[in-house]
Amino acid sequence: MTSGTQDELVALLQAAVRNAPGGVLTAASEQAADQLAELLGPPPAADPRLVHALAVFHLARFQALDLPKGEEDLGAAMAYFSALHDRYPELVPESLRKLVGVSSPEPDGSELLRAALDQGGDGELLREAVALLRAEIDHEPAAALYANLGVALRAMFEETGDRAHLDDAVEALTRAVDAADLEDESRVLFLSQLGAALRERSGFADRAADLDAAVQYHREATGLARGAAWPPAAQNLGNALTDLHQATGDETALREAIEVLEAASTASLNVTSANSLGVALRARYDLLGALPDLDRALGYFQAGVDATSAGDPTVVLAANNLGTSWAVHFEHSGQLDDLRAAEAALRTALDATVERAALRPLILGNLANVLHSRFEEEGDTARLAESVGLLRETSGATADDDADLPMRLTNLAVALSSRYERFGTAEDLREAIDTAERAVELVRRPGERAALLGNLGNLRATAFEVSGDRVDLDTAVAALTDAVESLHTTHPDRARHLNNLGLVHRQSFERSGSPADLDHAIAAHEAAVAIGPSTSAEQGGYLSNLGSALLARFHVDEAGPALDEAIARFRQARAVVAPDHPDRAGVEGNLASALITRAERDGPEADGDLAEAQTVLAQAAGRHDTDYPGSALTALHSGRWADLRYRRLTRADHDATDVCLDGLAAFQLCASDDRVRLSSRIDAARGAASLARRAGDLATADAAGQVVLALLPSLVTLERERPDREHRLVELAGLGGDAAEVRLRRGDAEAALALLEGSRAVLWSQLVGSRRLLDRLRSVDPELAARLTTLTTLLNSPPEINPALSARRTAQRRRAETYREWRALVVDAVTRLRRSP
């Protein structure tokens, strides 16, 4: 805006006041006020018309902003009215004449308060103002003096953080309301100030009681307010009702809040009214999960940001809420642009905290969460490091009784968990769990409880993968179950927690082999699918996890409709995950694997499944390059497809060689990728050995078998519970035999026998080391135990040494046959023991 004449500036300010509260919050009106203030001469020579215009403008801004945001405007308004009072008292509103008082040679408490607020809350002046106001109240306990004392004490609380000042402010403002006449125009102001002080105190203790009282005071103020004073009073009431809902879960309070705030915004839409309505709509989204509420909230937050100028401190909350809401929107859309919008909004908020330093920890924490999300999507470890650092800073600077602390702690726990998953540092996982448990212990907002419990459950599940400690697993199940039960039945986060609960039950099944655990997993996944969003990538994940659980049931039963149901779910998942979504290739890999499994089961009649699997795998492979870890898993499935296809061809088929070579290349790609789980790498190497052996390529089969034998002992050491270890060791016994068979076919009987002896020694030492297999077996099947003991004794005896080649080969063949029987008995024994109590 260009400089204007005095008359133009006065007219602009008067128009802004007529359009309050929105009109007085624009950048143009603020600039006009600054220019007019520069044109004023020193008192008493200053033109009273200009002084009056500025006084009324700043008073209207204070009423629009309320404390503490409007402190500077309140101080400016009182200073201008004080300058008018002595010579032009008629220009001072009747309701303010007691506040500005009469001039005297010595400043009174109200004048010192104005001076302190003018100087940004000067602590020394505030203390002097409080002392003078207390003395004046002792002489004349007027409502206006009590109100000024309350304002001064709130300002002291803002400066020191001493809650005793806030308690005293509530008491002083309560006395102001009690002392004010029912018809006094100042009563609306006193009621609003008292309600604001109670809302501020509700963040520390007696939350519901203070908020109930704040709602009642703001409700009375709204009923008394007229004209331009009504929208900010209604906004204060809506904010208090929203706070009450967030503290108690009262849905009636939230419905009323939205109604009141919609009326206030209709009367005057500005940064504060838009932000308040956005917060209420976001609260209803958090309660019910309706995306239209989240979209409307984003619109109002953006409108609030757009209504301010660059660097305007009033933009902080609207920009912060805009950023956090875009981050929530990303959880539904999976679009990186949502995260970019979130980061941009939060950096706008951070830039505006220069004059709102108390809000800086909040903004930094939210920015840290978005940086963490971007790390998860883009893999930039620098963003992860910055995120952990910011979250440590903000949670460490937050008091234990601050309602914001639990969410800051759980966000730190999640970031530490990501760092553990990235770098494998056990201390990060332990700290993450301790931090998440502390967050749950301190939670005060009902709406946050499910998220905190969900994070704790996920962390405990991660710990179980590492420790194998059943306590971790039971705690994970309990936390996730509690998270599910604490949410509204239609809330989208309920589906997410049900899905995670299903995954934890799957973990338990994989450890125990108990069908009951698998039943619980399937039930949780089915419940997640039933209430999840029907067309989102998130729903695709729920469907895919359900398909995997059904596939596990098929592998247990080897009958029934579970395999067909799994394929149907994988197909549904593929249909709802967009082709460009990063999860699409994984979903296609699961579908292809299930189709190959059905083709193996049904034989040549299932060539349609094999053809569909080939198409799906080709599309999956085309979605990423070999630098992407998921490409190795796609290669594993492609190798399985090629192996099955090769088995259905004859060597005379012209494409048999190509199919075999493609399969070997795919298996070897997965087996050599150290980013892939050991079990998948072993499966790939086994597949390569089997396919090469079938094709007569014994050198390749031998090399792949050696890779398997080199990897499997490492996998065994990761299994910390007896059933898992025994399962892996039985697998080792079979693989040793496979590798030995290849050596025999290559004519190297001595090497074959060495492989048999080596694998048997590892198998037996590990089984006896974990639990005494024979002692347990004698109580279950004495005859099997006796035969296994006999064969073990034979194999433990040194082999015969005979110089004659034919005799040596006969002894080697006999020992190999004994080993094969021994291996079969070990498999039988372990199977019997796994099924026994």
Image: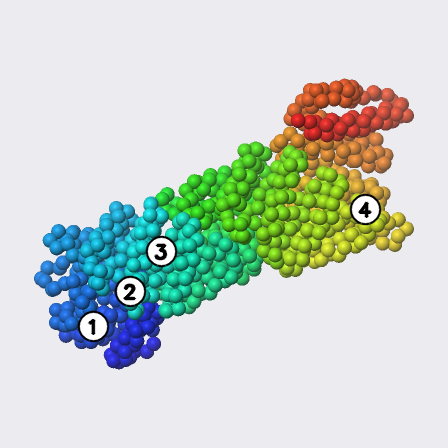
The picture places residue 759, in percent across and down from the top left corner, at 74, 30
* Spatial CA span between label 3 and label 1: 35 Å
Q: How many marks?
A: 4
Name the amino acid type tagged 4: Asp
Q: Position of residue 827 (x, y in %)?
A: 75, 29
- Mark 1 vs 4: CB contact within 8 A: no
Quick check: 710 left or right of 355?
right
Q: Which residue is mark 2?
A: 225
Type of amino acid under label 1: Val
Residue where numbered disc 4 is placed = 602
Circle 2: residue type: Ala
The residue wearing badge 1 is: 51
- Marker disc for residue 240: 3
Classify residue 40 as left or right of residue 788: left
Q: Secondary structure at mark 3?
A: helix
Depth check: give the residue in front, 470 or 816.
470
The answer, for residue 233, to whether it is visible in the render is: yes
Numbered disc 4: secondary structure: helix
Q: CA distance from mark 3 to mark 2?
A: 17 Å
Local crowd at mark 2 within 10 Å, few (<14), some, or many (≥20)?
Answer: some
The residues tagged by marks 1 and 4 sit, at their Cα atoms, a distance apart of 92 Å
Question: For the residue carrying disc 1, how many other residues have a C-alpha within 10 Å: few (<14), some (14-19), or many (20+)?
Answer: many
Label 4 to label 3: alpha-carbon separation: 65 Å
Q: Identify which residue is drawn at 27% across, 78% down.
A: 11
